[in-house]
Image (cartoon, helix red, strand yellow):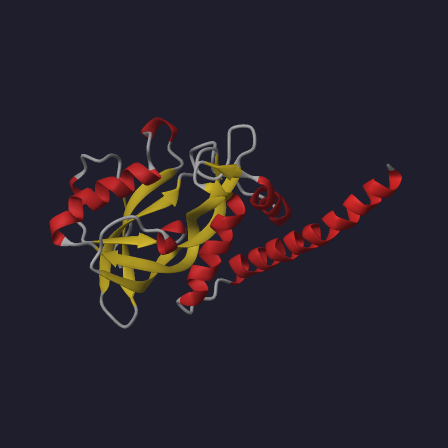
Amino acid sequence: MRRATIVRNMSSSSVFDVDWVFGYGSLIWNPEIEFEQASLARLHGWHRSFCVSSTRYRGTADEPGVVLGLDRGGSCVGIAYRLRDESREDAIRQLWEREIPDWETRVYRPLVAEVRLRGERPVRALTFAADRERPTYVRLAEDEILRRLHLCRGHRGANREYAVNTWRALESHGVRDVRLARLVRRLLAEADARAAQAPEASLIAEAVS
């Protein structure tokens, strides 16, 4: 298996020398690019993790959210998209601008890596891993991840929706991510508990007043 190649910038020839991109988070349920085929695929050597602080899409500078990144070790099942020949370069540029809108404040590092399609040959795909050298790379306790998912919101909406949508999208493809499922189930259970407590708190406040 060929090792993943780190892409330093958009001028690198390896960026456009791919026909596939690999999504493991929001790209699964909101690709926003043109493609001609979507297939389940596994990437070895990396796993899906809530290890990236988000101060733009799912949080703010004051209340950073947390989003998924590829981190070292294990493997990750996601969706590989085969790009259309006529719009391949535009799709790659669009994806780059989405994941790395500003190189100086980037949270991801682009990789060209080998992914294996289900029952088929391996293909080279562009994907985006968490950049461990950036201050946005975090290793949080599960309770802190849940706190951020509950409370934070950014330009693209609530952090909670990001997690739930990713889990549901994976489940719809028959993919079982045990850690993500545990987090989301706790998230939904705690949200239900908070919703149940809200009417009680309102009644108590009315009684006291």
Looking at the picture, tell me which residue is in the foreground, 208 or 44.
Answer: 208
Question: Could you tell me which residue is drawn at 47 percent across and 31 percent down?
Answer: 135
91 shown above or below 172:
above
Relative placement, left or right, of 4 versus 45 is left
Residue 21 point in image, percent of width and height? 26, 52
- Residue found at the far bottom of this picture: 119
Question: Could you tell me which residue is drawn at 46 percent across and 55 percent down?
Answer: 165
Residue 42 point in image, percent of width and height? 34, 62
Question: Could you tell me which residue is drawn at 52 percent across and 63 percent down?
Answer: 178
How many numbered discs sit on the rendered protein? 0
Relative placement, left or right, of 35 versus 54 is left
Residue 7 point in image, percent of width and height? 26, 40
Relative placement, left or right, of 89 versus 137 is left
Question: Could you tell me which residue is drawn at 37 percent across and 59 percent down?
Answer: 78
The quadrant the C terminus occupies is top right
**Quadrant position of residue 99:** top left
102 shown above or below 92:
above
The quadrant the N terminus occupies is bottom left
- Residue found at the far right of this picture: 208
Residue 52 point in image, percent of width and height? 47, 41
